[in-house]
Image (cartoon, rainbow, N blue to C red):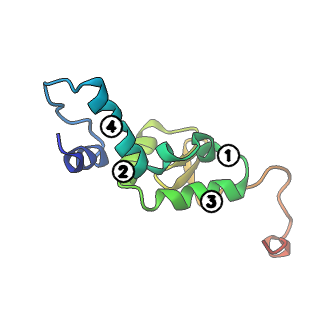
């Protein structure tokens, strides 16, 4: 199966028909390494997509912007009502997409009083 066909199938949210011949372990490893270089959540530390730090969450969101599987990832997360994390470049909290993750602790009374980052 061609990589572009696989990515198109996954991006549409399905697993698609897999070819009947089973690839050898070496072919599977090579394929996994190739996919890992194309998909940021496989290339970087997975903890980044579930980070507590707002800066780390924003970094994860930015890495997702170029991912070829972004639409399928987001659609799957919405369907599963993911409890939290960054999925498809969006932040989920309690199974709902939120514009940004709020930091820990009590919120500021006035957002304009936030220190410049």
Dots 3, 2 in contact, CB < 8 A: no
Which of pointers 3 and 4 indicates the residue nearer the eye?
Answer: 4
Q: Earlier in the sequence, mark 1 or mark 2?
A: 1
Identify which residue is drawn at 62% across, 59% down.
58
Instruction: Please say if the residues under marks 3 and 1 sit with CB atoms less than 8 Å apart.
Output: no
Q: CA distance from mark 1 to mark 4?
A: 29 Å
**Residue reaching furthest to the front:** 26
Q: Which residue is mark 2?
A: 69
Name above or below for residue 104 compared with residue 27. Answer: below
Looking at the image, residue 54 sits to the left or right of residue 12; the answer is right
Residue 51 image label: 1
Helix, strand or loop for disc 2: loop
Residue at (22% x, 51% y) in the render: 4
Q: Is residue 113 above or below residue 11?
A: below
Return the residue nearer the eye: 41 or 54.
41
- Considering only order in the chain, which callout, 4 or 3, is on the residue closer to the N terminus? 4
Q: 23 left or right of 109?
A: left
What mark, if any, has residue 30 been given in the picture?
4
Q: Can you tell which quarter of the image residue 17 is in?
A: top left
Labelled pair 4, 2 in contact (Cβ < 8 Å): no
Q: Quadrant of residue 79?
A: top left
Instruction: Give the residue at x 57% y 54%.
Output: 60
Q: CA distance from mark 4 to mark 2?
A: 19 Å
- Label 3 belongs to which residue? 58
Q: Residue at x 52, y 55 (%)?
A: 90
Mark found first going from the N terminus, 3 or 2: 3
- Residue placed farthest to the left in the image? 20
């Amino acid at each position: 199966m061609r990589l572009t066909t696989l990515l198109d199938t996954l991006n549409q949210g399905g697993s698609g028909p897999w070819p009947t011949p089973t690839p050898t372990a070496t072919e599977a490893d090579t394929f996994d390494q190739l996919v890992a270089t194309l998909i940021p959540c496989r290339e970087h530390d997975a903890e980044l997509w579930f980070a507590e730090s707002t800066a780390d969450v924003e970094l994860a969101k930015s890495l997702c912007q170029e991912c070829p599987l972004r639409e399928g990832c987001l659609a799957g997360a919405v369907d599963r009502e993911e409890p939290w994390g960054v999925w498809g470049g969006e932040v989920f909290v309690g199974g709902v997409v939120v514009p940004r993750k709020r930091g820990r602790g009590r919120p500021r009374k006035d957002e304009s009083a936030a220190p410049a980052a």
